[in-house]
Amino acid sequence: AQSVTQPDIHITVSEGASLELRCNYSYGATPYLFWYVQSPGQGLQLLLKYFSGDTLVQGIKGFEAEFKRSQSSFNLRKPSVHWSDAAEYFCAVGENIRGGSQGNLIFGKGTKLSVKP
Amino acid sequence: GAVVSQHPSRVICKSGTSVKIECRSLDFQATTMFWYRQFPKQSLMLMATSNEGSKATYEQGVEKDKFLINHASLTLSTLTVTSAHPEDSSFYICSARDSPGLSYNYEQYFGPGTRLTVT
């Protein structure tokens, strides 16, 4: 069955430090991969997505993620974290419509990012 | 970019009453809409998927008679929580997707969510 694992429940980094949030997926076909960010009491904002092509994907707010098929990973990175980046981050895999699904998203449990001044 | 709105953003209701939440795609036609539920400090759990003009497909364990979903037009889907109870209190988020097209590239656009509190 398809699944997404975010091993870190909570991460704290200092402002200006680099960040890497881990995401591993289990999916039988070519995955469509997403990273979303959620601020408290808000909906989800798409940071970046991978469908095909270049395995290093650039997103908004200075985020990037690298798809590594051999490791079934799609880790999110940012070279220098800002205090406003404190939020919950969700990795998701999208089911392939070609396989007859509705294109559902399967979410990881999320990683809460706290930023120290 | 594609915008999805939800209304209301926050609602408090008494136990036993019904509540309707609207999800609208503002600048695109949503052939498919998804309804999620999110408990505090937890991930999003898919409740159901609805296609315009069709009955919704519910995930296992979701009571379709309790969570009524109507997707009557390409821009509007509604979720009605019937006979609400305190355990239905949660954050409900909808998302919408347009036609994937020939490339099958697609993404879901999320609404801002609705906080339901049942007293």
Image: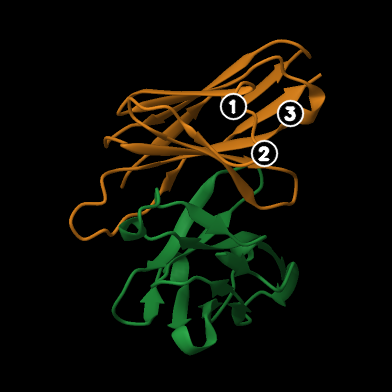
Q: Is residue A31 above or below residue A105?
A: below
Label 2: state its secondary structure: loop
Question: In the shown orientation, is residue B43 left or right of residue B86?
Answer: left
Sooner in the amino-acid sequence: mark 3 or mark 1: 1
Label 1: state its secondary structure: loop
| CB atoms of marks 3 and 2 within 8 Å | no
Q: Is residue A43 above or below residue A55?
A: above
Residue assigned mark 2: B61
Dividing the picture into quadrants, the one containing residue B91 is: top right
Question: In the shown orientation, is residue A26 left or right of residue A53?
Answer: right
> Residues under labels 1 and 2: Cα distance?
9 Å
Q: Nearer the viewer, residue A68 or B47?
A: B47
Question: In the shown orientation, is residue A16 left or right of residue A79?
Answer: right
Residue B64 is tagged as: 1
Q: Please state the horizontal and vertical placement of residue A82, each as a whole percent of the image.
A: 59, 69
Dividing the picture into quadrants, the one containing residue B11 is: top right
Q: Residues within 10 Å of mark 2 (few under 14, many from 20)?
A: few
Q: Please state the horizontal and vertical placement of residue A101, each as a whole percent of the image.
A: 40, 52
The amino acid sitting under disc 1 is: Lys
Q: What's the residue at 56%, 79% (across, down)?
A: A80
For chain B, give the colour.
orange
Sooner in the amino-acid sequence: mark 3 or mark 2: 2
Label 3: state its secondary structure: helix
